Amino acid sequence: RISLFSEGGGMAPLAAMIPPPPPAHLSMRAEIEWLAGSADNARGVALALSSSLFIGASFIIKKKGLLMSVEKGGSSASAGGFSYLRQPVWWLGMLTMIGGESANFIAYAYAPAILVTPLGAATIAASAVFARFFLGEDMHICGIAGILLCTVGTVVLVRFAPEEAPVTSVEEVWSMAMQPVFRAYVCFVLSFTLALVYGAAPKYGKTHVVVYVAICSMIGSLSVMALRGIGIAAKLTMRGSDQLRKRETLFFILWVGCCIATQMNYLNKALDTFNTTMVSSVYYVFFTVCTVTASMIMYKDWENQTPGSIFWQVVALLVNVAGVHILSGTRDSAPGCRAGLRALLSRRKSEEKPEYTHLCACDDDAEQQQQQQQRQQQQPPP
């Protein structure tokens, strides 16, 4: 591992912190394993990136199903309706998301959450590209810079990813979950989520995307911790040590089911109310922060890492967040790089596009209906 500090106690030069190039004459698989640090990390990275593409596509397909449901006279998900369940397109998106989440679930069995979760930046880039072609949503020219930043952040994160601590039984995972600090985190998440569900969501859920997304993210961080436990149990079972029949594994499975049901409910509300790119980008930031925090508390991913590795992991995470912010913040700004920079740096409320300054709703269908009603009122009577 590369240290952030020199042997004399001072700050190490930046060049000394950059890893050497890979050995010559390596196969592609060996190069990926070298970049990721281990064969297990390489498998986790491949599965996580595949998962991001599937999940990014599922956002678009489910959004299409929600719009089709409303067009046919059904009640919207934001109004508490479930008419979208009768749309085959929505179920296709659900199956796509299940496929992506399945790959993501397996990825957590091979790589730590601090590596797998931030790779979700690829989901944002994929959803922005898919939304451009299938939903007609515009992508600003600065979005290309955002995609490049996400790519750079992903490569750096993979290169300095921590290796997973060896776990020999699901009882070890259960003992980690029973730590007083992690139990305090679980109590905080559940209490804050209940406050959002019964306090903030009825008042601000349709105008502030952070309400629905915060519920999904905090509950999602708990589901990831349990998913990783299930993945470890499955991996140990395939290696000859049966862990799937133990009560700890069954509890993790039940816990994940409850968490995913809650996540899907409020994610549907967010997608039905807000712009797809906004939901996916804000969800990425909140979900990544919550999951990395939970993983640091429960699995102690940074406990045996050098300051240099931690430094570059944090840098990679910030680069990914910057890329995601650029993708979402410039989506509805005026064309051109200058207009995009003004949209990113401006802190004042925009009269034309307030939704990205205060994360307010952007319901295109409602705006079109309002404009049509205004035109009808302006027409003279026959």
Image (cartoon, rainbow, N blue to C red):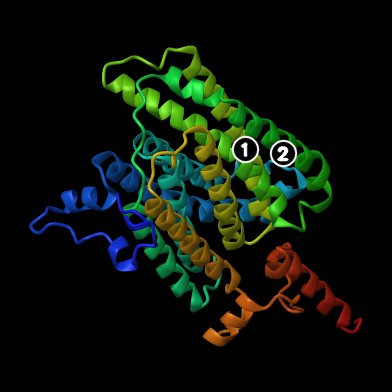
Residue at 49 percent across and 13 percent down: it is 247
Task: From the top left corner, tell me how far across and down residue 6 is, in percent.
Answer: 33, 58
Task: From the top left corner, tell me how far across and down residue 294 is, in percent.
Answer: 55, 38
Element at label 1: helix
Q: Taking 188 as reference, is 168 above or below it? A: above
Residue at 70 percent across and 47 percent down: it is 77
Q: Taking 352 as reference, is 52 above or below it? A: above
Q: Which residue is mark 2?
A: 193
| Amino acid type of the residue that numbered disc 2 sits on in the rendered structure | Thr
Q: How many marks?
A: 2
Residue at 38 percent across and 19 percent down: it is 169
Quick one: 324 or 5, which is closer to the camera? 5
The part of the image, by quadrant, that contains residue 239 is: top left
As drawn, which residue projects farthest toward the left?
25
On the question of residue 76 being in view, the answer is no
Disc 2 + disc 1, Cβ < 8 Å:
yes
Quick one: 135 or 329, which is closer to the camera? 329
The part of the image, by quadrant, that contains residue 71 is: bottom right
Q: Which residue is mark 1?
A: 219
